[in-house]
């Protein structure tokens, strides 16, 4: 059960759910006995209660006619989740080729994997992960040599990898 009620102190309108014994005004925080609150409508449909409250607020502000053209709350909420423009049209309007954007999203590894993850995956995949083999495999996957060498050092310092006698291992 939903009820659109009004505060006797500040005239705020709000929706009560259920048959609460007391209710607190969201604006002035006055506590009211439920049976003493003025109830404008009682309904089992939450959307109907929202529509009534919204219509009353629109009338108060002199925008009743504009509100009438908007439609019900449920329909407006459903329309709000629909995209206004598709991704391809948006990119084209911004001067970006959608096919190039899709290719860039794929990245050098064929997926949207960052460099750190790519390097860790490379170390895990190798049978004998020496620095030279890691550099060769990672450069084949699109990373440059200097980046791989500096990242290996950083990953060892951070504890993601360990290096013992020239062999790397993922921790």
Image: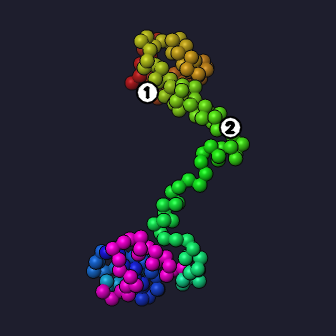
Vertical order, 29 against 171 (above or below): below
Does dot 1 land on a helix, a strand or a loop? loop
Residue 23: x, y in percent?
A: 34, 79
The quadrant holding residue 28 is: bottom left
Q: Residues within 10 Å of mark 1 (few under 14, many from 20)?
A: few
The residue positioned 35% from the left and 80% from the top of the image is 42
In this view, the mark in front (2 or 1): 2
Is residue 54 rendered magenta in the image?
yes
- The rendered magenta stretch, by its main secondary structure, is classed as helix
The residue positioned 38% from the left and 87% from the top of the image is 38
Q: Residue furthest right?
A: 95
Vertical order, 129 against 56 (above or below): above
Identify residue for label 2: 97
Question: Foreground residue, 161 or 105?
Answer: 105
Along the polypeptide, which appears first: circle 2 or circle 1?
A: 2
Residue 153: x, y in percent?
A: 52, 22
Range covered by the magenta-colored residues: 35-58
Question: Is residue 123 in sight in this rendering?
Answer: yes
Question: Foreground residue, 77 or 138?
Answer: 77
The quadrant holding residue 143 is: top right
The quadrant holding residue 149 is: top right
């Amino acid at each position: 059960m939903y009820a659109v009620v009004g505060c006797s102190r500040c005239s705020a309108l709000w929706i009560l759910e259920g048959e609460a014994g007391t209710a607190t005004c969201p604006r002035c925080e006055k506590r009211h006995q439920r049976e003493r609150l003025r109830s404008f409508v009682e309904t089992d449909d939450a959307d109907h209660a929202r529509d009534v409250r919204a219509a009353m607020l629109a009338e108060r502000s002199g925008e009743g006619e504009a509100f009438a053209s908007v439609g019900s709350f449920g329909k407006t909420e459903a329309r709000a989740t629909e995209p206004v423009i598709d991704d391809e049209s948006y990119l084209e309007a911004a001067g970006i080729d959608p096919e190039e954007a899709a290719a860039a999203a794929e990245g050098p590894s064929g997926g949207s994997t960052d460099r750190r993850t790519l390097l860790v995956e490379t170390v895990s995949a190798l049978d004998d992960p020496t620095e030279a083999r890691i550099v060769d495999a990672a450069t084949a996957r699109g990373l440059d040599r200097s980046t791989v060498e500096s990242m290996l050092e950083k990953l060892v310092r951070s504890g993601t990898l360990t290096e013992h006698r020239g062999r790397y291992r993922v921790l």
